[in-house]
Image (tube, rainbow, N blue to C red):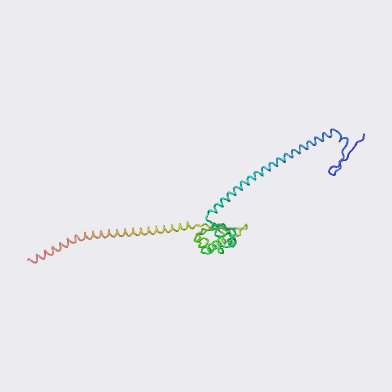
């Protein structure tokens, strides 16, 4: 019996298949089992991929939840900071190493941002206190150390106001001073109260000094009066024996004269 062979091309490869074996039930059973195993393996891989996909989705949802929570926290913090800045009588700004404004939050909105950004204090304001503020900031910039100072301004923008100014240097990654951050807080009311309290304390001190001097005067007067009284008493007690002595002497002298006269 002759053996038939068919030639089949798979993926550009020539494979010879035994036609007799190809036509048997056994072959197709084996073929079906292999396909069943391949399908089962494919289903398992699909399930694994599906589980991994679900896990990734859950991770993304959890991360999204964390991001949303963090976003809400940042939003609340931003609102809180905005609330503080809106209600606090402060000026907050950043100036570069030439002391030109790069950012400012101004509670006193007499000037717009475009009138300030890129300019120095002496280019924006006029009046007393401006030059002192500029020199103070430059001192912090040169020393590289934070500092604070009370400065009284007499300007058209502020009028007569005293600010407590906090200034800190800003450094680059290599440690070079590249500018300053500062905050100015209106402390005019506190300064006026402090001055009034100082004046009251001074008046109290003067009053106490006067009272002390008066007490000293009264004490001296009382001592003087007691001394005069004591002297008067001593004078009286001295005069009484002397008066008696003088009278006796007078009597004796007159008696002797009388005797001598009538002898």
| 129 or 83: nearer the viewer | 83
Of the pair 96 and 116, the residue shown nearer to us: 116
Left or right: residue 17 versus residue 105 is right
Q: Quadrant of the N terminus?
A: top right
Residue 213 x %, y %: 35, 60
Which image quadrant is residue 195 in?
bottom left
Q: Position of residue 255 (x, y in %)?
A: 11, 63
- On the image, the x and y values in percent for residue 121 come to 56, 62
Residue sitting at the far bottom: 261
Q: Position of residue 73 (x, y in %)?
A: 59, 48
> Which residue in the rendered view is the most extreme toward the left?
263
Above or below, 34 relative to 70 = above
Total numbered circles: 0
Residue at the farthest top position: 25
Of residues 16 and 47, the one nearer the viewer is: 47
Residue 181 horizontal side relative to residue 191, left or right: right
Query: Which image quarter is the C terminus in?
Result: bottom left
């Amino acid at each position: 019996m002759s053996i038939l062979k068919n030639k089949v091309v798979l993926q550009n490869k020539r494979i010879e298949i035994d036609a007799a074996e190809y036509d048997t039930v056994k072959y197709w059973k084996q073929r079906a089992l292999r396909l069943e195993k391949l399908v089962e393996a494919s289903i398992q891989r699909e399930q694994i991929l599906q589980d991994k996909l679900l896990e990734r989705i859950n991770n993304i949802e959890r991360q999204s939840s964390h991001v949303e929570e963090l976003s809400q926290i940042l939003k609340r913090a931003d609102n809180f900071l905005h609330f503080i800045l809106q209600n606090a009588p402060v000026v907050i700004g950043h100036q570069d190493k030439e002391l030109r404004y790069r950012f400012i939050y101004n509670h006193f909105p007499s000037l717009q941002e475009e009138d300030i950004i890129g300019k120095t204090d002496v280019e924006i304001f006029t009046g007393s206190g401006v030059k002192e503020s500029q020199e103070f900031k430059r001192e912090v910039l040169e020393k590289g150390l934070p500092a604070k100072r009370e400065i009284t301004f007499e300007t058209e923008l502020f009028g007569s106001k005293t600010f407590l100014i906090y200034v800190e240097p800003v450094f680059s990654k290599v440690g070079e001073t590249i500018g300053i951050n500062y905050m100015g807080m209106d402390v005019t009311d506190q300064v006026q109260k402090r001055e009034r309290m100082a004046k009251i304390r001074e008046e109290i001190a003067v009053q106490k000094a006067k009272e002390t001097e008066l007490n000293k005067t009264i004490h001296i007067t009382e001592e003087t009066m007691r001394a005069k009284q004591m002297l008067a008493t001593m004078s009286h007690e001295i005069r009484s024996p002397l008066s008696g002595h003088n009278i006796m002497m007078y009597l004796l002298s007159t008696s002797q004269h009388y005797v001598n006269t009538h002898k």
